[in-house]
Image (cartoon, grey):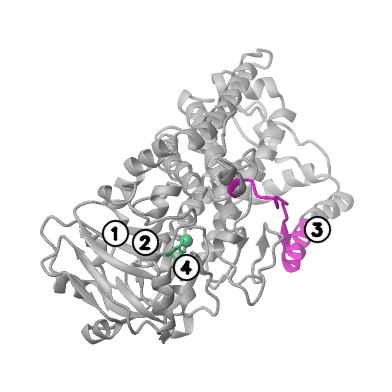
Amino acid sequence: MFTHFTPAQHAVHYPADRRLYIGLRKEVWYIICLTVVIFFGAAWLQYLIQGLPADPSAKLLNNSKGSSGFPWWVVLCHWVNFFFLILLIRSGLSVLADHPRLYWNNSCRPGTEWLRFTPVNVPPGKLWTAKEDARYLSPMIGLPGYKHTVGVARHWHFISVPFFLLNGVVFIILLFLTDHWQRIVPVSWSIIPDAWSVFVYYATFNMPIEPNGYFHYNALQQLSYFAIVFLFAPLAMLSGMAMSPAIENRFHWLPKLFINRQGARSVHFLVMLGYLAFTLVHVFMVAATGLKRNMNHITLGTDDAADPMGMYFGGAILMFVIAFCFFAHWVSWRKPRFLQRLAAFINGNLWLHSINKLKPKSYFEKKDITPYFWSNGKIPESKVWNALAEGDFKDYKLKIGGLVEHQVELSLEDLKALAKEQNITMHHCIQGWSGIAEWGGIPIRKLVDLVKPHDSVQTVVFYSYGEGLYGGVYYDTHTLDNCLKPASILAWEMNYAPLPVQYGAPLRLRIENQLGYKLVKWIERIEFVESHTTVGKGYGGKNEDDEYFDLIANS
Ligand SMILES: Nc1nc2c(c(=O)[nH]1)N[C@H]1C(S)=C(S)[C@@H](COP(=O)(O)O)O[C@H]1N2
Ligand SMILES: [Mo]
């Protein structure tokens, strides 16, 4: 059919344990229940004591002033928005499944999540990597779904973002260039009591007066459309941006708007839930208040209560979106390189010329260091590394070569004698977790000065003693430019102690405007080259080669 897994791929993407488990903290349950009780309780109380309030929509009846129906651009923007929203939500869920826990703290210690989608309790006293913790997601729900598909899921997500945004900007510009804004932007505070009155009707199973939606919305409808455009969309954008390592490290105030980076991640999820809830209620109301007429409004732009054409049109659009989801599934498994290239063409270029240029600043203090730090990667199994580890890395020599004037081999003592810098920074894993630690080591800039790369060098390759998830040497590449940024170091120290084995002993990389997978641990050697295309399979690193991750990982 759409996927042809080898037995090895089958084991990875289709694991034995595929239970879906949703664990919500007790306190959050209480808050949700309390909110529902308060709102519905107040509505019922008012209804039982005072009866139904005066219907605020009464004044809108037979009023077609100040509104020009549904112009073609509203119709177009609405459906374009719908299309990309589906892609964003489905791919976003796939990304979430890769670290199925949501927190309000930067430490991400298992057990402190307010919501989790995994039945697994992290076993104490055993190395349980974040990759092991990833969950299976049905491809019916996620794009592309299955386990360990965060690379491809991100491509769908980030390719959609610019189009979703552009569509939103076009919509808002046209909204204010025409009189259409009056339909969704409230101009009086009376919208709040009016919306409440409408809510009392719905909550007590009464239907309020239905103004002709071709000209006017009722107060609650107007308020919710306003919130979707002017509250949810900006929140989605800001919380999304706040998760980027390049942005977190330069504009620390942005994640702080959401308490911290994990708060931003949680808000990003909650906004998605908001969109989802809105869509369900919206579709229900469209059907409940005159499906034919409403569908004519939003597909043909006509106000006709009998013509079934709008319904057929809407159905056709829905079929197209569903068909596209199948197509997207096929592309994800059969043409993932195409997706990776498309993402590089669109976002790789966008990021390279914008956020990748930002220089990391230091913000965090000793008190911010997180007590927990997830881990990823296979600890090296090679004889050479094991022998070095047994000798406490006294015989370790970092080899630096490639297109340089002076090839060198440096022991840890040599490196320590050259220079040392200490930074307290946040680690951003592509899966979604974070952690803050102090890292001590040598600025890469010092090594560049020492070996003097040729003018043609653009890229630096870091090879590990360890292997990738699917076998073969783990490596990654960085632009020389990023290696020279502030806080780009080779670290031998973590939290004021020698780097533990699990975290990359004897030497690991820290380049703070990039995601975790680019920060190679257990470094064996460094090579200066002209381009990443001549290394490995040519996509810039082990994960880039095998899992279609981005070459530049700013977000
Ligand atoms: N050699 C090697 N380095 C690696 C990896 C790996 O699998 N092998 N995983 C990367 C990923 S995905 C992350 S998130 C970080 C994790 O670093 P930590 O264990 O210090 O948290 O290491 C990166 N470096
Ligand atoms: Mo990672």
Q: Counting other residues with Cα less than 10 Å from the Cα at mark 4, is it few (<14), some (14-19), or many (20 or more)?
A: few
Q: Which residues are magenta?
A: 12-38
Say what amino acid the circle numbered 1 marks: His
Mark 4: amino acid: Glu
Q: Label 3 is placed on what type of residue?
A: Val
Spatial CA span between label 4 and label 2: 27 Å
The local secondary structure at tag 1 comes to strand
Q: In the image, 100: left or right of 172?
A: right
Indicate the position of residue 427 as horizontal and vertical percent values.
44, 68
> Residue 29, image x and y in percent?
76, 62
Q: Mark 2 and mark 3: span between their CA atoms? A: 45 Å
- Asked whether disc 4 touches disc 1, contact meaning CB atoms under 8 Å apart, the reply is no
Residue sitting at x 78%, y 42%: 202
The extreme right residue here reads 48
Residue for point 61% across, 61% down? 133
Pointer 2: what residue? 514
Q: Nearer the viewer, mark 4 or mark 2?
A: 4
Query: Quick one: label 4 or label 1, which is nearer the N terminus?
Result: 4
The disc labelled 2 sits on which kind of residue? Gln
Give the spatial CA distance, label 4 vs label 1: 25 Å
| Residue denoted by label 4 | 381
Q: Residue at x 59, y 51 (%)?
A: 189
Whether residue 66 is visible, yes or no, is no
Q: Is residue 369 left or right of residue 43?
A: left
